[in-house]
Image (cartoon, rainbow, N blue to C red):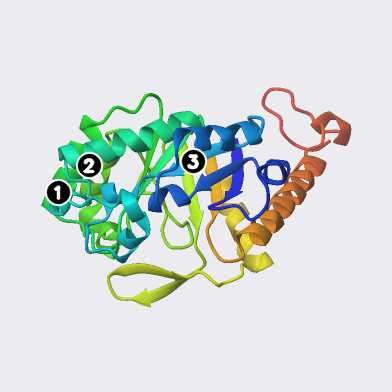
Amino acid sequence: MRYVGCCSRRVTWQEYSRLFDAIEVDSTFYRLPRVETARRWFESTSGRVRFCIKAFQCITHPATSPTWKRAGSQMPKMNQERYGYLKPTEENFECWNSTLVVCKAVNAKICLLQLPPSFECNDENTRNAIAFISSIKRDGIVIGMEFRHRSWMAEENKNKVISILDRGVVHVVDPFTSMPVELREIAYFRMHGRLLDRGYSISYDYSYRYSDDDLARLIQIVNEVDAEVFIMFNNTHMHDDALRFKSLMRDDTCRISSTSIDPTARGIDIGEGNSGIT
């Protein structure tokens, strides 16, 4: 199964559910909605959209992150040093439990933990990630994790990444930057735009509009993946690019189907030991 969607919506829920079959709710990263609000989101799609939720930022980002300002009244006032970086603290667990409630309200398939560029691949961060993931309840929600420090892409750190994925975690990537270290039942691709060269940080030009050649390349990547695939566009032109991708993918499927002719209709002898054309 291939799901195509955006990391936010710019139309009504009803219109979105007509155009796409998946969404990644980005707003939950900044502030968690009331459960009643999340339920209305789900009900507005009549169950036609597969929801993915981006986890509340206090789980992944330290208090020094500028995004914390957007949390408003939800920004923790005490023990701020105990938040973020997947630290296995009661504070982070409490934030996770609040995120999980929202995930369940929309019947989410995946909850994305997006780490900041300052979260580098080292022993401490790896231990914390494993301890956090191993301690939380999931209630059937799949955990996806996206790293944005280039050290997680280094060959010498591959085993650290695998040690986290072994806890039932999906390695979330932009496939134009790197492929998952391991592909299992689910592949989750986030299309951010054009990759920028900014040292250790995996950063993007979100204003980039994907060309048809880019999207054809993405189709090729998706077709080679033997798993359930989520393709979520996160660039400025996400809505238009996702629609173009869906159209091109549909055309590609039709082309493949039209060339899949019954071999006997072309006079092919498919008897044992003979695969030649007669």
Marks 2 and 3: which is nearer the front? 2
The label on residue 92 is: 2
How far apart are labels 2 and 3 at the CA level?
20 Å
Label 2 with label 3: CB-CB less than 8 Å:
no
Q: Which residue position is annotated with label 3? A: 52
Residue 48 % position (x, y):
66, 33
Q: Quadrant of residue 49?
A: top right
Q: Depth check: 102 or 148 in front?
A: 102
Q: Quadrant of residue 112?
A: top left
Q: Depth check: 176 or 134 in front?
A: 134
Q: Which residue position is annotated with label 1? A: 82
How far apart are labels 1 and 2 at the CA level?
7 Å
Question: Which residue lies at the image location 35% right of the left edge and 55% below the top edge?
Answer: 72
What kind of element bears circle 3? strand
Disc 3 residue type (three-letter): Cys
Question: Which residue lies at the image location 84% right of the left edge and 29% below the top edge?
Answer: 264
Q: Indicate the quadrant containing the C terminus: top left, top right, bottom left or bottom right.
A: top right
Q: Depth check: 229 or 234 in front?
A: 234
Label 3 with label 1: CB-CB less than 8 Å:
no
Residue 136 % position (x, y):
25, 31
Q: Return the disc, 3 or 1, that comes first in the chain's sequence.
A: 3
Residue 20 visible in this rendered orientation of the protein: yes
Q: Depth check: 213 or 45 in front?
A: 45
| 99 lies left or right of 132 | right
| 69 lies left or right of 17 | left
How far apart are labels 3 and 1 at the CA level?
26 Å
What kind of element bears circle 1? helix
How packed mark 2 is, by other alpha carbons closer than 10 Å (few <14, some 14-19, many 20 or more), is many
